[in-house]
C-alpha cells in the first residue's frame, strides 16, 4: 500500500526506493559469495558481514547516481502543483537518504523473514531465484522500505 501511494508523489521515488532494495539484495549475495567469511546474524547463517558491507556501499552509490539521472526525466516527476519542487542540485541528498535506509535498515525485513522461515521450518519461500530463495524473499525488505519511503517523501 505504501509503495502504491509513493507513486503518486512521482514515479522516481518508487523506482529509486524499490530498485535500491533489489540492488542491495543482489550485491549482498555477490559480495557474500566472493568475500564472505564472517557470519552477520545467527538467524540467517548465510548472511555475512562482508556481503552486508559491500552491498551497502553499492546501494548508496546506486541510489544517488540513478536518482540523479532519473530526475531529468519529466515523466517521472509528479506534475501536481501542490507538491514542493526540489532543486536538482540538492536532490541527491534525498536519494542518499533513501539509499542509506535501503542499505542499512531495509535488510532487517530479510532478517525478520529468516526468523519466520526458521519458525515455520522451511528453507526458502520458493526456489525461483537460485541462491536468493523465492520471489517472496525478494520482497521481504520492500515492506520496510516502502513504508519508510512513503513517510519520508510525504514529510
Image: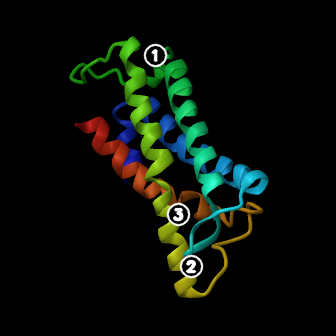
Q: CA distance from mark 3 to mark 1?
A: 34 Å
Res 40 quadrant in image: bottom right
Vertical placement of 132 versus 147: above or below? Answer: below
Q: Nearer the viewer, mark 3 or mark 1?
A: 3
Q: Which residue is mark 2?
A: 117
Percent across and percent down for residue 15 are 51, 36
Q: Whole-percent x and y of residue 86?
A: 31, 17
Residue 42 horizontal side relative to residue 13, left or right: right
The crowd level at tag 3 (other Cα within 10 Å; few <14, some 14-19, many 20+) is: many
Cα distance between the residues tagged 2 and 3: 10 Å
* Residue at image location 28% in from the left, 44% down from the top: 151
Q: How far is mark 2 from mark 1, CA to CA?
A: 42 Å
- Label 3 sits on a secondary structure element that is helix
Q: Earlier in the sequence, mark 3 or mark 1?
A: 1
**Residue position marked by numbered label 1 in the rendering:** 74
SS for callout 2: helix
Pointer 2 or 1: first along the chain: 1
Amino acid at each position: 500500500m505504501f509503495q502504491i501511494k509513493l507513486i503518486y508523489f512521482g514515479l522516481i521515488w518508487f523506482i529509486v526506493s524499490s530498485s535500491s532494495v533489489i540492488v542491495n539484495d543482489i550485491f549482498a549475495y555477490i559480495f557474500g559469495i566472493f568475500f564472505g567469511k564472517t557470519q552477520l546474524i545467527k538467524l540467517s547463517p548465510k548472511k555475512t558481514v562482508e556481503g552486508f558491507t559491500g552491498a551497502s556501499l553499492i546501494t548508496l552509490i546506486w541510489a544517488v547516481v540513478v536518482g540523479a539521472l532519473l530526475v531529468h526525466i519529466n515523466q517521472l516527476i509528479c506534475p501536481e502543483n501542490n507538491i514542493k519542487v526540489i532543486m536538482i542540485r540538492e536532490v541527491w541528498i534525498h536519494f542518499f537518504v533513501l539509499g542509506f535506509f535501503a542499505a542499512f535498515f531495509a535488510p532487517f525485513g530479510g532478517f525478520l523473514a529468516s526468523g519466520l522461515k526458521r519458525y515455520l521450518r522451511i528453507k526458502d519461500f520458493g526456489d525461483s531465484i537460485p541462491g536468493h530463495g523465492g520471489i517472496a524473499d525478494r520482497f521481504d525488505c520492500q515492506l520496510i522500505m516502502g513504508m519508510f519511503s512513503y513517510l519520508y517523501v510525504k514529510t
